[in-house]
Each structure stands twice: as structure tokens, then as C-alpha cells.
Image (spheres, rainbow, N blue to C red):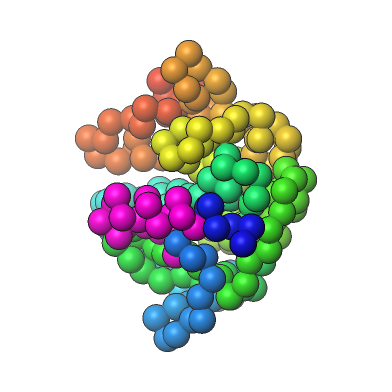
Amino acid sequence: MPLAELTGVLERVAAERGGVLGVEPGLVIDPDASWTPLSELTRAPYTLLDGLVEQTAGRYGAPRHVGAALLWKALGYWLTFPMAVGWALNRQVPVMRFEDIYFKPSDAGVTIAATSVSVVDSAAAIGAALLQAHEPLVNAISVQARVGRRTLWGSTAEAFAHPMTAVVQGDYMGLLRAIGRPVDGLLEQTADGYRRRTCCLWVTLPEAEPCATCCVLREACAA
């Protein structure tokens, strides 16, 4: 199986985290009533999306736009996580069509899975998958909660980098450059890793410390 090594790593990470993982280790499910199609978040009048944004904002005592940015930071991370790990392992990358992706609330915030998964081995194919499966959500969140798309795509860029430092070592900067827009140029290399060029807005929460990769730790931070 092309993804056997990846699913093995996902199972290991889930075990290390006490089962708290935002993606099903096997990736593919036969959804029951506990799962919701991800596409429902982009369906007008956006009732489900608005509810999740308000729920996230309430959890952190944050304004609506900050709640939206933090919702995407979690959701986008888990959507990207298996792609990042798959690339770092053996360049066998699972991609899920937008219409095939499901999610449900979990201890990880959300858990992601799909009814079917394809395997690609090129950065261009990953970029196409981002535009097909991630861009509809980025656009909906940006419009409904007035969050800059660059801010949201910055979280996606970091969602490639973090697993490739914390789970399986990989050349995340090279991958982002190869993917190109909309994620290239949103991270910068530092002596001890990377730093974002956009802010996820976590630092705007009351008494919150900036993330170790936050752009506020440098002079300029673009929204």
C-alpha cells in the first residue's frame, strides 16, 4: 500500500498523544451520523461555519475574526498534516477532494477524514489539491469573518512546516517554494527553524504570549 508508512506514523503519533489526533490514522472512513461533510461549511447562509467561528471565539474570549483565524489554524493544520508527513517520509502524499472530506468535533478540536484518498508525488499536485480542497474554506472564512486570506494561508504554510520539524524531518521551505502560491513566501528561515510572515492572531488574546514562530518577534508583521 502506498500510504502504509504514513498510516503507521499517524497511528504512532495518535498513541503518543493518547489518541488525540485531528486526522483519522487510516485517513479513509465510511461516515456515520457523527461526521459532517466539510463542504457544509461553505454552504450559504453559512450557519454551520458561523457557529464554529462563534464557538471558537467564545472558547478563547476572542473577537469573531480572531476566533475564525484560530478555527482555521486548527482545521487547516489537520487537513495539511498527512500531506506534510507523507512528503517528508517518501513523497507519497495523500490528497482528498473537497467533496470527499468529512470532519467531526474531537479532543483535537476537529478530526478529519475522507471517503476516498488519492496519492500524488509532486509539489504541483499538492498545490492543485490546496486550491481545490482548502481554498473554498479560506475564501468562506475570509469573507464571513473578515480575516485576510494571507493570514489564513500563513497558517497553512506553517501546517506544512511544523510536522516536518516535530514528526518527520523534511525540507519544508523547499516544498513551499515548489508549491508556489498561495503558500510560498509566508515563512522565513531562521537560525533555529522558521518564522511566520503573518500572524495567526493568537497573540491578540488577553495575556497570550506570542507563538515561538510569530512574526511579532521580528520588526514587521503583515496581515
Number of on-image labels: 0
Give the answer, above or below, for where 43 lies relative to 69: below
> Residue 178, image x and y in percent?
73, 35
Q: Of residues 130 and 3, which is closer to you in this image?
A: 3
Q: Of residues 131 and 41, which is closer to you in this image?
A: 131
Q: Residue at coordinates 36% horizontally, 40% vertically from top-left?
A: 202
> Residue 219, image x and y in percent?
47, 16
Q: Residue at coordinates 65% horizontally, 50% vertically from top-left?
A: 92
Q: Quadrant of residue 154?
A: top right
Residue sticking out furthest to the bottom: 33
Magenta span contains residue 22: yes
Q: What residue range appears in magenta?
A: 7-24
Left or right: residue 155 versus residue 111 is right
> Residue 174, image x and y in percent?
66, 29
Q: Of residues 28 and 104, which is closer to you in this image?
A: 28
Residue sticking out furthest to the right: 124
Q: In which quarter of the image is the N terminus?
A: bottom right
Magenta span contains residue 161: no
Q: Is residue 191 visible?
A: yes
Residue sticking out furthest to the top: 191
Q: Is residue 65 visible?
A: no
Q: Quadrant of the C terminus?
A: top right
> Residue 57, image x and y in percent?
33, 56
Residue sticking out furthest to the left: 207
Q: Residue at coordinates 40% horizontally, 20% vertically from top-left?
A: 217
Q: Residue at coordinates 58% horizontally, 48% vertically from top-left?
A: 86
